[in-house]
Image (spheres, rainbow, N blue to C red):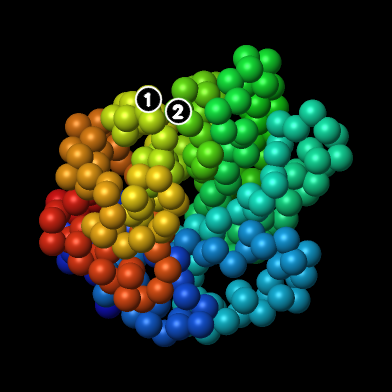
Amino acid sequence: MPIRQAWERHGCRMKRLYLVPDGNDIERSVGLAEEYGCAFEFNDFYVPAILDDVREQEKIIESYARYRSDFSGDTMHGAFLDVTIHSSDPLIREASIRRIHQSMRIAKRMGLRGVVFHTGRLSGFRVESYLMQWVDRNFAFFTGLAEEFPDLQIYMENMFDEAPDIMAVLAERMKGTGNFGICLDYAHAALYERPQREWVETLAPYIRHIHVNDNDLTNDLHRPVGTGKIDWDAFDVLMRTNKIDASVLIEVKGYEEQKQSLEYMKRRGLYPYR
């Protein structure tokens, strides 16, 4: 069954669910994605050793291409380990730029829809000069990157960010850039003191992609949706009340936990299910 038909069968006509494919269990990954109308978000290409090994990249791409001929609806997680575009150290900044460009070239090679990057901010560091430097340098860099790769969506994800305000400042400055938006990691946001409502309401105009998984509100556990302490009914209300129109990655590993999460969300009619 074509993915869009499967997607519509499961009541999600206007939005899409994403799964992380398991390269060691690819047949079941593809089958689960087709059954639930999901696209893929590839997590293979943020590792530095793979970013520097074109042969290994091609090997991975070919392994997926044996099961799927079209990646145009898929996304990938770009480089994020120690990536700091806003660094005051030009050598660190140069390395960060190189890693991000490597990610974008892989995504272009595969014909993907978009790439997810992290903010790279120091958590809780609220010195105004640091925050403004983060905004200014990311604005300059990602504006240029979006122009260089106009066919790829670029998503900025919260990681160690204790509040949504600075991301919103950047997104507002970039609102004229059609292929840039926010990836709200709802589970990451749950680890900090700011209420989930504040995260969603502040970033609502800019959210284009969402990551979901569960945790104990203290540690980033990537547990199946519905098995931790996150209030998913509140998540559903916030998404619908704020008229969020975004794709959703169920960011858990392996067939069993992915299916468990999908079934939980479908059974309860959680966003993006109707």
Left or right side of 95 for 257: left
- Reading the image, the residue beneath label 1 is 202
Q: Please tell me which residue is depicted at 67% across the width and 62% down the height of the picture.
A: 47
Rendered-image quadrant of the N terminus:
bottom left
Residue 99: % across, % down: 73, 51
Does 106 appear above or below 96?
A: below
Q: Quadrant of residue 103?
A: bottom right
Disc on res. 251 = none
Does 262 appear above or below 178?
A: below
Q: Please tell me which residue is depicted at 65% across the width and 31% down the height of the picture.
A: 138
Left or right side of 34 for 120: right
Left or right side of 40 for 136: right
Q: Please tell me which residue is depicted at 86% across the width and 40% down the height of the picture.
A: 91
Question: Three-letter amino acid code at disc 1?
Answer: Thr
SS class, disc 1: helix
Does 71 appear above or below 31?
A: above
Q: Residues within 10 Å of mark 2 (few under 14, many from 20)?
A: some
Q: Are marks 2 and 1 in contact (CB under 8 Å)?
A: yes
Does 123 appear above or below 20?
A: above
SS class, disc 2: loop
Q: Please tell me which residue is depicted at 55% across the width and 51% down the height of the picture.
A: 115
Q: Quadrant of residue 231?
A: top left
Question: Three-letter amino acid code at disc 2?
Answer: Pro
Residue 13: % across, % down: 23, 55
- Reading the image, the residue beneath label 2 is 164
Hey, which residue is sitting farthest right in the picture? 91
Q: Nearer the viewer, residue 241 or 86?
A: 86
